[in-house]
Image (spheres, rainbow, N blue to C red):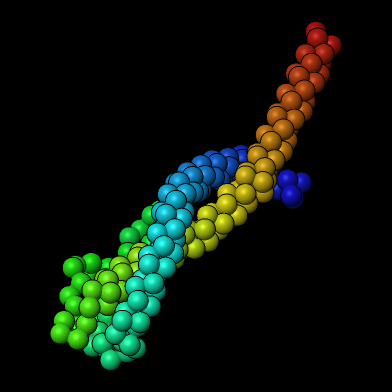
Amino acid sequence: MAEQIFPTKGNLIKAKKNLALSKLGYELMDRKRNILIRELMQLVDSANEIRGSIEQTYLEAYDALQEANITLGVVEKFASAVPVENSLCVKYRSVMGVEIPMVDIGKGIPVVPYGFYETNSELDKAYMLFSKVKFMTASLAEVENSIYRLAAAIKKTQKRANALKNILIPKFAGISKFITDSLEEKEREEFSRLKVIKRQKAVKAYRKK
């Protein structure tokens, strides 16, 4: 690559500028990667915590539902009174240019949608636990989607950083060295040529005397 570049001062300035930009780009990519990795690790810890809690809550909810079915019979008619969830809202925040979702599902106190005359505390317990699972599922979806987006961004950033470090920086460093060496060699040749001319002029002047 370097041999194909004509060794001029203009090309040397251009090569050094590209080298400086490549180094700056690598530093920015490396910094971005580290920030994204730190954000990812925090979310991984949150995801593990939520997964552990949600599994336990699901077990408790299904146990409560089973008790309600045993004591009340099949509770499908009460379940049909539960309204469809339509409060889900997704917004986004930016982390180094990566859009991270923020899921809001209106985490207020659940309102029991059925009457208490034909129900019991086991059904209430099952309803409250499944409401809790709903909120936890939304939180887990937010965290896991964020992890996926961050992981993809980290992979892409790492690829760009590697390209800068292993391809572009060595390339422009090589071009700069080639042009610098060529210009220095040219200057040495010019200096030697001028010395020879000066010596020849001095000899001619001496002979004329």
Residue 2 visible in the snapshot? yes
Identified at 34% across, 88% down, the residue is 74
> Residue 47 versus residue 150: which sits nearer the camera?
47
Identified at 63% across, 51% down, the residue is 163
Q: Residue 151, image x and y in percent?
A: 52, 58
Q: Residue 102, image x and y in percent?
A: 32, 64
Quadrant (top left/top right/bottom left/bottom right) for the C terminus:
top right
Q: Residue 133, image x and y in percent?
A: 34, 69
> Residue 191 versus residue 103: which sits nearer the camera?
103
Judged left or right of residue 46, residue 11 is right
Residue 190 visible in the snapshot? no
Q: Which residue is the extreme one toward the right?
A: 207
The vertical placement of 130 against 94, above or below, is below
Q: Quadrant of residue 107?
A: bottom left
Q: Residue 139, image x and y in percent?
A: 35, 64
Identified at 35% across, 76% down, the residue is 67
> Residue 63 versus residue 3: which sits nearer the camera?
63
Q: Quadrant of residue 137?
A: bottom left
Judged left or right of residue 155, residue 140 is left
The vertical placement of 35 against 52, above or below, is above
Image mark count: 0
Identified at 25% across, 84% down, the residue is 82
Q: Which residue is the extreme one toward the front?
A: 71
Judged left or right of residue 14, residue 90 is left
The vertical placement of 105 against 22, above or below, is below
